[in-house]
Each structure stands twice: as C-alpha cells, then as structure tokens.
Amino acid sequence: MATVSRESVREILHEFLAGKGLRKTAQREAIIEAAFGTNKHYTAEELLEMARAIDRSVSRATVYRTLPLLVQSGLLRELDLGGDTKIYDPNFLEHPTHNHLVCVDCKKIIEFEDPNMELLENCITRRLGFSPTNKMVKIEARCDELQLKGSCTKRMESKA
Amino acid sequence: MATVSRESVREILHEFLAGKGLRKTAQREAIIEAAFGTNKHYTAEELLEMARAIDRSVSRATVYRTLPLLVQSGLLRELDLGGDTKIYDPNFLEHPTHNHLVCVDCKKIIEFEDPNMELLENCITRRLGFSPTNKMVKIEARCDELQLKGSCTKRMESKA
DNA sequence: ATTTCTGCAAACGATTTGCACAGGG
DNA sequence: CCCTGTGCAAATCGTTTGCAGAAAT
C-alpha cells in the first residue's frame, strides 16, 4: 500500500523542519517515525503511545506541539470527523484527493477516492466563489451492520 | 426564505417532546423560540444569549441539555465544521439536502445544494456498503478574499 | 404527590501553555 | 554559549453532570 518510502518522508520532513530553522531532536524523530510508520488513522493520544514505544521520553506536550508541524508540512492530514478528538491521517501522499465516509454509530472510517466527486467538488467550490484548495469531504452514513442489526460490532473497539 | 412557519416548527416540536414524555417548560419554549427564530447558524453559547433575550432565567446547562433534543427531533442539524465549537443549523426543514462550504481562514460558511452532489454521494455511499442516511458533506476551501488578499475581512467577526 | 426540570457549580477531557531545565547549533 | 525544545503540571475551553430545590402533570 505504501508507495512512498519511509525514507523520503523523513527526508521531506527534515528539509521542512530545517527550512523553518527547527531542530532535529530525538523526540521529534520518534514522533515522525511513529506518525508515518503506519497507514492507519490515529489520535494524538494514540500517536503518543506509538512514539513512546520508540522513545520512552516523548511527552504528551511534545506530541501536541509536533503534530501541527507535520500537518503544515503537508504530509499529515488533520481530520475533523466529529467527536471531540481530532484524527490524523498519514495517507495523503499516496492518495492526495481521498475523502472519508464515517459511520454515524461505530465511527468506522472508510477512505475513498472518486474522480467524479473530485470534479464536482471543484465545480461547486468555484461556482460559489471559493478556491478549490485544501478540500475535504466527509460523508456521514450508516454502515451495513448498523442498517441490518441496528448496531455495529465495531462500536466498542472504535476510538473515535 | 423561511417557507416553514414558526408555528409548525413549534407544533412538531411539541409533539416530539410529548411523545417522549417530556414536559413543556418556559425555558424550553424560550430556547425553541430562539433556535428557530433565525435562519443563521449559531453555537450553543450564542443560542444561550438568544434564549436569554427571551427568558432571562435560561441557563447554560439547560441549553446544552435541550440542544440534543432539538437535533433528535430532526429540525435542527448539528454541524462539525472543524474548530472546537459545534455549530447548529436551523435550515434543514427547508433545505434537507444542503451541504456546507467553509473557508479555511475566516471560517465563513456557505450553504449550497446540488442535485449532482446528492446523487454522487448516494452512489459512493452505497458502493462502499453504507446506507445513505444522515449524509453531510463539508468542503473546506479558500474564499475569494483569502485567495486575492491573503486574508479575509470577515476573519475577526467570525465566531466559528 | 410524583417525577421531570432547572440553575449552580464542580467535573471532565482534549488540547494548550508557563516555567525552569536539557540539549541541539 | 545561545536559543530552541522538552517534560511537567497547571490552565483553558467547550461541554457534561451531581445535587437540591422548583415546577409540571
């Protein structure tokens, strides 16, 4: 699935940080490693756990301070899928135009890409006088399980 | 703009509340009056102010306890447009399928309806095994001002 | 009378921030 | 060395909740 190597991500990030006069620290390295060592979504708290598995000294504050940097770099996407926790998605390099479908009950997230949607988004956005930059579409819906059984199996295991 | 009368809203809501064995109180009346006395979006805090203008005794807690009821009734829509504050939209009776476009900078919200988008949403949603219920699309983009001047006039006056 | 509602203030949970020290350049 | 980065713990901010009294049925 990952067509962009971990190395190039690290490289891009190093350039990005260097360009901003930011330093290369063990904690940031660990966070970066954790952030792009998966292609699953995660919360800040989950990223903290993952980063700590690499470097025990990483603190919550540093994760929260580093996340905005990763987002600014363009390699990480911050998703507001409802709920009180932000979700981060490391899959945008490979699928820059993908969107999200979220089950209203179990919050299961499905990523999808659709050229028609892409096209239509652009049309609508322009028609309304906006510039189609940084678009982001979320569709809330009911997953099959919810539709059939009235509740979702995944409901308890989901974190957001 | 408002084709659904305030009276029918009140009626529907009374039935809804009665059906749940809920009581009709002065505070709820004030909140309902405030919530549907406008067709603009508002936050919980803003609704509190509006409701207090009608009945000074309305408290923040009651607003927060009443909002979910109004949402359940189907007359009020809760929007997660990013940011840390939920936004409520009383315009869904008139425009049940409308979506939102949000400026990434000034957070200006534009409502739009588009039959193609509607159709496409349904197709995609079904294709992915979800049921097209309770859909909700948000497009983040840059408004004209932001694009041209690099910042938005509305930036300071916007609340969310 | 019984049960739901309410306001108040304390509790909450995610995120942010002030501070003094640690550690890159 | 200088200045940024860090962990810690306290602070925020929107929202939720426990409680005792108030009001609706």
Image (spheres, coloured by chain):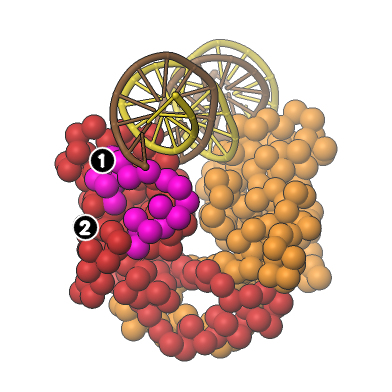
Chain colours: A orange, B red, C yellow, D brown
Q: Mark 2 falls on what kind of element? A: loop
Query: Does the magenta-highlighted stretch encompass residue A12?
Result: no
Question: Circle 1 sits on which residue?
Answer: B26
Say above or below: A112 vs B155: below
Left or right for B26, reference B95 = left
Chain letter belonging to callout 2: B
Left or right for B2, reference A125 = left
Amino acid on which disc 2 is placed: Gly
The residues tagged by marks 2 and 1 sit, at their Cα atoms, a distance apart of 16 Å
- Judged by its main secondary structure, the magenta piece is helix
Amino acid on which disc 1 is placed: Ala
The location of residue B95, given as percent across then percent down, is: 35, 75
The location of residue A115, given as percent across then percent down, is: 59, 86
Choose top left, top right, bottom left or bottom right for residue B110: bottom left
Q: Which residues fall within the magenta stretch?
A: B12-32
Question: Circle 2 sits on which residue?
Answer: B37
Choose top left, top right, bottom left or bottom right for residue B126: bottom right
Q: Mark 1 falls on what kind of element? A: helix
The location of residue D16, given as percent across then percent down, is: 51, 36
Please state which of residues D4 and B123 is positioned toward the viewer in this rendering: B123
* Residue A51 appears in view: no
